[in-house]
Amino acid sequence: MIGQLIDSLSDPEYTGDRRCWPCTLVNAVLVGLAALLVGRRWRRLGGVVVLGIGGVLIALRGYVVPYTPRFAPQLVDRLPVDLGFDHAPAEPSDSLVAAENPDRLVGVLIEAGVLTGDEMLHLEDGFAETWTREMDTLRGGSDREIAAAAAEAVPFDADSTVSGERLLVAGQRDAWLSRPVAIAETAGIEALVAAGVDRETAASAVGPLRMFLPVCPDCGGTVAESTIQNCCGGTKGIYDRPDREVLACVDCESVLYEFQPLDETAD
Ligand SMILES: [Zn+2]
């Protein structure tokens, strides 16, 4: 009976791993205020009941105030303090090295025979094979081993460590990488160097080169264009928009490349 009630009330879309903490927080504050108001104007017991029911519903459903997902994340974003909500699954991965001049890099890659094609650039077959082979080799390693390989691949002294689901390569700056991106870029640098590109250029070219990934670095699956949605249509800062165009793995759903929205690249 109680189990059935809980089942019918609970909403997996907004709870568990998918719980949106800004929504939960805003609702907790609103329920608290409502309880206070009811307790003051009528009886203390009324306030306790409001608090209890509100709390249970937030726990089971993610939120109680209608339309919370439409306004809570934006509201929390505007608070003057950083509450440190962890949006790790939605947060994009860094690149090992920031690409500075993409146009020049494309020229270098065409010259090295890595990219080919007239109207639509694509990977040269031989290079795609080398890159895939390098990724196959790395894929068997633990996160720690992959982070260490990434620190070896960059053209400067770097330390590596693993924190939760992110691989950190700390050298000129801190690069926090997802495992698939770390595999893609480490293997990509080695493949580019093998194709005759100098390591410095290879390291800055490999981020944009992920746009051409032949297979999923983490599972070897098929790469396809896709759209990802954040739980409530918004997170933080520059990623505060409902949909993001990405390349993702069809099999393991890893996000492998994020297309930059036009308004951001225009700046
Ligand atoms: Zn995959």
Image (spheres, rainbow, N blue to C red):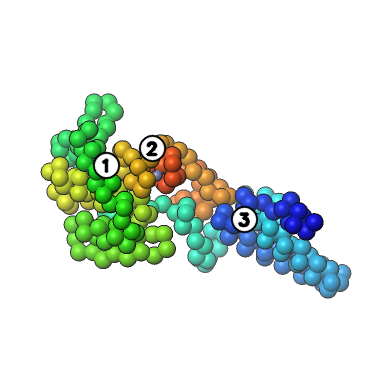
The kind of residue on which mark 2 rests is Thr
Label 2: state its secondary structure. loop
Residues under numbered marks 2 and 1 in contact, where contact means CB atoms less than 8 Å apart: no
Residue at the extreme right of the image, as rendered? 42
Label 3: state its secondary structure. loop
Counting residues from the start of the chain, the first of labels 2 and 1 encountered is: 1
In the picture, measured across the screen, residue 130 lies left or right of residue 231, that is left
Above or below, comparing residue 128 to residue 190 in the picture:
above
Q: Quadrant of residue 72?
A: bottom right
- Give the number of the mark in front: 1 or 3: 1
Counting residues from the start of the chain, the first of labels 3 and 2 encountered is: 3
Label 1: state its secondary structure. helix
Cα–Cα gap, marks 3 and 2: 30 Å
**Which residue is disc 1 drawn over?**
132
Q: Which mark is residue 222?
A: 2
Q: Is residue 209 visible?
A: yes
Q: Position of residue 17 (x, y in %)?
A: 56, 56
Above or below, comparing residue 124 to residue 60 in the picture:
above
Q: Position of residue 212 (x, y in %)?
A: 30, 38
Q: Is residue 63 visible?
A: no
**Which residue is disc 3 drawn over?**
15
Residue at the extreme top of the image, as rendered? 119
Disc 2 within 8 angstroms of ligand 1 (CB): no
Q: Which mark is residue 104?
A: none
Q: Position of residue 109 (x, y in %)?
A: 19, 39
Counting residues from the start of the chain, the first of labels 1 and 3 encountered is: 3
